[in-house]
Every structure is written in C-alpha cells, then in structure tokens.
Image (cartoon, coloured by chain):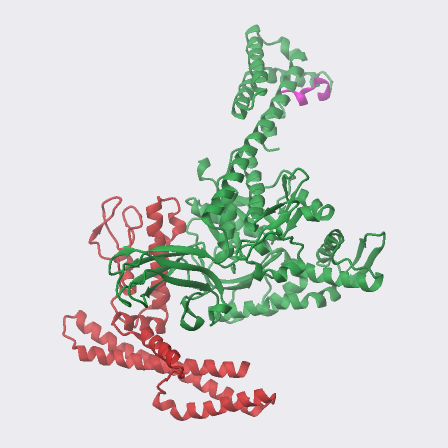
Amino acid sequence: MATDRIVGIDLGTTNSLVAFMQGESPVVIPGEDGSNLVPSVVALDQGGKPIVGNRARNYLIETPERAVYSIKRLMGRGMEDIQEELKFFPFRLADDLEAGEVIRIKLGDKTFTPPEISALILRQLKRNADRFFGEPVTKAVITVPAYFNDAQRQATKDAGRIAGLEVLRLVNEPTAASLAYGLDRKQNGVVAVYDFGGGTFDISILKLHDGIFEVIATNGDTHLGGDDIDNFLITIALDDIRGDLGLDLRRNGEAVQAIRKVVIEAKIALSSQVSVKLDVELPGGERYLREITREQFEQLIQPVIDRTVGPCKQALKDAGLKPEQIDEVVLVGGSTRIPRVRAIVQELFGREPHTEMNPDEVVALGAAIQANILGGGSEATENMLLLDVTPLSLGIEVAGGVTDKIILRNSTVPASATQHYTTQVDGQANVAIHVLQGERELAKDCRSLARFDLKGIPPMAAGMPRIEVKFLIDANGILHVSAREQRSGKETEIQVQPSYGLTDEQVEGMILDSFDNAEEDFRRRQVIEARNEAETILTALDKGKKSPAWGRLTTNEKKQIAKMEKSLIAVKAEDDYRAIRKAIDALNQGSMRLAELMMDSAVSTVLKGKTMEDADVGEGPTAPHPVAKAEFE
Amino acid sequence: MATQGESTHSCWSCGAMRAAHFCEACGKVQPPAPADYFAFFGLPRKLNLDVAALEKDFYELSRKLHPDLNARTDKREQEWSLEQSSLLNDAYRTLKDPIRRTQYLLQLEGVELEEQSKAATEKARATGEAKKQIVPPDLLEEVFDLNMQLEELRMHKKMGEDDPALIEEIGRQKLELEEKRQALLNELQADWKTWDGLIGREQAGQLVSEDERKQARDKMVDLLNRRNYIRNLVRDVNEALEN
C-alpha cells in the first residue's frame, strides 16, 4: 500500500541518496538528471528559491555567498564547538546570532539553521522519490554516523520533520552498510565496518548470528573525513600561491572554491593514477600549476588517515577482540577509495577488506533494507534484525562537577537507567538535573545534552521526597526522560532545556512553512507533467487522424474519440492533475483500436516494400505509449 | 526458559494464556510487568548461569520485543515494545557479565554497594580529606611499596627526568596486580557456589538461616571491594605512567 512505502535515505556530508526495496533487492532512486547521488550542496538563486544538488554546485564557484556545502558538520553543534570548522569552511554565520541560540547560516540575504538546510536536501530526495513512485512519499529511515551524539541525532530527526517526512528510524551508517553486505552473504561471524566518508569516520564491530546483526562496539570521529583531506590540500595550495606568486587568496571565496574543485579532482584521480597535474586559473589571469605524485599525496594525508587508527583500536578493545578474531572487514564511504586508506585497514586488521559494493551507495541500500524491516519485512529480509548500541556513555553531573555514568557506551539500545533524587531543603519544589554525554570524568569535559528541571515536587521535609527519574535511550539513540515522585505517586513535570538544538515549537514553525510548499510544489509539478503528457497524446492523435487507419474507424468510434479529445483539451486548461490524467487514460483507451489499425497498416506497408518511417508509426499513439513514456521521465 | 514464562496472565489482545513478555498465540507484545532481571529471563537468583543459553534467550526475545519489529503497531504497543526491549537489553547486559551480575544480585539482596561508595566519596569531599579506603590486608605491603614508587615517578616527571628502571619496575607490579584481579574471578566462582547452594536448598523447601545468607553475601561484598581496590590502583598506575 502506498502509505506503507518507506524509503531509506543516506543524508551524507558530501552526497545524499534515497533508496527503496524493489522486490527482493534494494535500489537507489535516481534524480531527474539520472544521477544516483545528490550532492549535499544548497544554494539560493537570485529569486530566493532554494537549489539543491548538482545545479547548486555551480553557485559554489560563481556566487559562493549564496551556497553552502558540508552542512552536516554543523548539525547539532553550538557556536563554541564550530570554531575549528569556521577556519576551514566558508560557513557564513548570521550577524545577529545570540549566545545559546541554534546557529544560523547566511545564504544570500536569508538565514537558515543547519536542520533547515538539511531539510532542503531531504526535500530534494523526497521529490526524486515522489516522481519515481508518482505519488508523495511520507515515511523514511535516515542514516546518521554511528558516533553522532544525541544533539546531532535530534537535529537530523528535526530536518526530516521539516522536510515533511515521518522519520521512523535513525540508523547508524556502518550498521546500515553491514545490512546491505549481509543480504547476499548470509552467514555468522564477526565483521568490522570501516566507514570513512566525506565528513565523518566510524568503525563498528558486529556479531552476525542467524540474521541478527548485533553491534558489539562502535567508535569514531564525527569531524574526520574527505573534507579534512581537501582542506589540507587547499591550505597547501594557498601557501604555494602566496609563496610563488605573492598572491594572498585566503579571503577570496571564489578563488578558494576554484582551488577546492581542482584539488578534489586531483585527490580522486590519484586513487587510479600515480601522478596528477594541478592547473587553476587565478583571478588576475595568473595560473597555479603543480604536479603531485601519489607518493607525495600519501605523505601529505598520512596525519589525517592516522586519526582513524585510534578509534579502531578502541573499538577492538571495547569489543574484547584481537584483530585476528575479526572474520571480515567491509569498507564504506568515498574516502576508502584512496589506496593508502585501504592499506592502513589491511595493516590494522591483517586481512584484505571487502570492496564489492559501491562505497557511495551501500549505506543508502542498507537504509532501504532497514525501511523494509520496519515496514513488516519481506522474503529477503526475513529474520533480519539490527541490534545497535549507543556510541557514548550517558551521565549526570553530581557534586563537585563530576560525571556519574548511568548508561555506558556500547550498551545495546533501547537501554535505560533509573536514578533517585531527593531535596536538600524543606519544601523544595524543584530539582535540577544536568545530563551529559561522553567518556570523561569531569562534567565540563563531556558534552552537555540538556538540563532537566523536575517541577511540582509535593512540599515535604528535606530528604523526604523520593523522585525516581528514568532515562531511556530509544532505538534511534535519542534520550527520553520521565520522572515520578514515589511517595505521592505523582508524575513530576520535566522542563527540558536542550543545550543545543531546536525546541519543538521552532521545528513546528519550520515544518508548516516548507511542508505547505512541498505539497504545493508536488501538485504543481504533477500538473505540468500531466499537461505535457496530454500534449503528447493530442499530437499523436492529430497524426493518427491524417493516417489511412482513421478512415477505417466507424462513425461511432470517431465520435467517441472526438468527445474524449474535447474533454481532455478542456481539463488540460485547469489545475487538477488527477482530472487530466483520467482524461488521458480515457483517450488512450478509446483510441486503442486506431492505434492497432495504424500498426496493421504499418506492417502491410513494410510488406509492400515501404519503410517504417513512411508509415509514421513511431509517433502514433501506440508505440511508444505516451503515458508509459512520460511517467518515469 | 523465558519462552516458558508462567502462563498466569492472558493476552490483552487475543485472550490466550501467554508467556511473560509476548503472546505465543498472536505474537503481541504485552505491557511490562515489574520484574527483576533474573525474573525477566525466568531464572532463579543463582549466580552460576549458562551464558550461552542466556544469549540464545536474548536473541529469541529480541525477535519478539524489538521496536523495529513492532513499528507498525499502535502507539501504545510501540511504547510497550520500547519498554520491554530496554528491560531485556538492560537485563542481558547485567546478567551476562560476572561482576555486574554479582553486584546486581547483592543489590537485590539489599546490599547498597554503590551507595556505600558514593557516601564515602561525598564525605571525603565534604571534609576535604582523601577518601579512606580500607586496604585489603594481603595487599598492604605491596600497596605501600607501589605508592612510594609512584610518588618517586611523579617527582622524576616533575623534574623532567627519565627513570627507565623505575618505570619497568612499576610496569611489572601492574602486571602482578592484574593477575591478582584475574585470580579473584576464580575465587568469586567459589563464592557463587556457596550462594547457589543456599538458593538450591530454598528451592527444595529447606530452611536457610539469615546468618548463612549474610555470610555468603559478605564474602562476595568483600571480594568485590578488593577487586575494586585493585582496579583503582591499576588506574592510578596508568595515570602516573601516562602523565
């Protein structure tokens, strides 16, 4: 049923994809341009209309102030933790940002929060899926880096909501990839997934057991990826240009983007070639020319790649496994195409990694499989179940600024912990709880998740109330908190102040805006497409009337066709795409005999030694069938 | 085990008598009933348990209770599935690990392990004194030596000096401590046997005196304390070596 259709989405730092389960295997849904990947780039055109994907990439070079990429790096983060990012990425922050507010990025003269920009990418994917299915898709599974914290996960979920999607599940990217790999090689054993993408790095170790994919340990770095390699190369090029040509281009957005484009191309080429030539045209007509060998490249990027080693070792330690106990290693993410990265993985685990599946698509395909499982499963996914873990320990701040860990990292989710609180003063009505995420001993070194205010505690002597607080991490890795005063049995009201992230009301406001637009966009597009189809069939009919076959129809048949033609022309002028499609279908049915007759005459013409072109059959209403043709264009 | 849970309840959905967490007739997840982790798996409160069988039960129950497999039910059932499956995961995580399992049982038996330690920490903070830890008698001499050496190492480091011999000696002691900690695990299993014996007698309808229970508990509390002490010591050594 259409309402049960759930798509799987890989919302990547560099590229995003949408996939679904077609029969027994997952497939990627291409965009209008036929490409499976939608670059995660968003731009605003001069009219203020958002442009997403390949077309937005041109804006990056021509009007960089109207475009943004790698927005995933800012999801769920606050001002103080993006300072490093601001040095290397051309993110333009809104001028009127206040402390504690969710960051906003300037595009042209408008500002957007990271979830809103991600929502624009999701909407493009949704549009591609809508087009593919011929009706709106409303439910999705979205993947996130395994090492994403609560705020980053919440921000991703918010983005889905803003885009008009019901996010049924957030799935960790490496785990999704393991599902895609596991689909055609059903077996038991221990698998390590090394996921090195555009902006994030994850390592997950899983135990496969009769269709159960149980994550034993995960680790990573949510700010380590191909982006870092690019930025490294850009810095070197800018230094070179300053030294050799005396040009300081660090603040020239267009020049930096032109250099970025060239170094990315060079990086990709160096995975298959041993040397490449950089050639960038600079403002003022100068050129930056340089040759880089693979050897030099590998030396340069070694420090970036080395940063993946620590998390791998920690994950092995947490899993209580030695490298030789890993049965298979799987590579995911575009950065694993770099030969040096593959070599490091081979060194780490002492075995050749699997690279059979396209590292850019495997996460989206896995998301489609998870979507299928959530939707009730099929023969291909029967018995498959994912048991994932929380990547970071959950703690609460106790006296002295110390973190008391209540749910340890690598605990299978859903997971819960219960804590008891009481009051310090007679009649105290509120208790504050500070929730943290991270591995460090001191609260100030962990990530602040939220401050919870327990309110409305019945008045009692100090130390008398017994408030039970339940912390629950759901299957998305997102925290829920509930509290109850046990003596009175009263549910305690909790006021949440998320440390980073949008409030429910804010998200609600954003949804209404864009959701209405999305529906309107969809409808408008459908009308345009339906009118195009109507044009095609009407033109074909005109041709048919001039063919000898027309004369062989009965008067009644001709009358019928004329009537249907008239009604199609009438509804075509209106905005109801359903009515247009209905009229198209009717005319198609009604002109079936005409099409057959034309076919017959074409065949007999051939027999008489004439060509198909003479019969003009190619444009008749039969082949290709105009409706079938237009639907998937 | 778990799937054989008592059939004293009937399914809210189809009315059939059911297992504890889901209905065997219609497969529906049931509202969670208050249960300790042992009871959740239908196990007696014994400490020596078959971890392979526990894992098998865990997988089987996951296939019934996990939210992914109950995503198409109504809101209430999804809520139950979330609660039941978090309980399942919490219980499995606790019971599969020998130390956590022992701590949990002692907690069920009314021993406030964590509270004791927390109270001591808070008192130490309030008075500004170092938290007093009772040194296990069999470790007294070693701990004394080790602390001296750690002090020496910190001094050297402060002066920017290097003392490979000292570092090697400390490393050797750390290894010994880790071996001791491992040996404690074996000792713990003997304590389990005593405890399980008492539970076995109770199950057979025999009387077990509170004294006997207390004795068995105290032995385990003592052992866990010694183990924690060694763990903290190893942590101190690691810190001193790294800094």
Q: Is residue A150 left or right of residue A35?
A: left
Q: Observer-nearest residue: A152 or A217? A: A152
Residue drawn at (45%, 54%), measured in percent from left and top?
A: A476
- For the question of whether residue A22 can be seen, the reply is no
**Residue ranking furthest to the front:** A426
Residue B182, image x, y percentages: 40, 81
- For the question of whether residue A46 can be seen, the reply is yes
Q: Is residue B58 left or right of residue A180?
A: left
**Residue A48, relative to residue A284: is it above or below?**
above
Locate residue A77: give its quadrant: bottom right
Q: Observer-nearest residue: A476 or B200? A: A476
Q: Is residue A182 left or right of residue B14?
A: right
Query: Where is the C terminus of chain A found, in terms of image quarters?
Result: top right
Q: Observer-nearest residue: B3 or A114? A: A114
**Residue A307, relative to residue B241: is it above or below?**
above
**Residue ranking furthest to the top:** A555
**Residue B23, relative to residue B51: is it above or below?**
above
Residue B58, image x, y percentages: 35, 60
Residue drawn at (48%, 58%), measured in percent from left and top?
A: A499
The tint of chain B in the picture is: red
Residue A280, image x, y percentages: 80, 54
Q: Is residue A471 left or right of residue A263?
A: left
The residue segment tinted magenta is A612-621
Q: Is residue A508 magenta?
A: no
Residue B3, image x, y percentages: 28, 56
Main SS, magenta region, reads helix
The tint of chain A in the picture is: green
Q: Is residue A614 magenta?
A: yes
**Residue B217, relative to residue A50: is it above or below?**
below
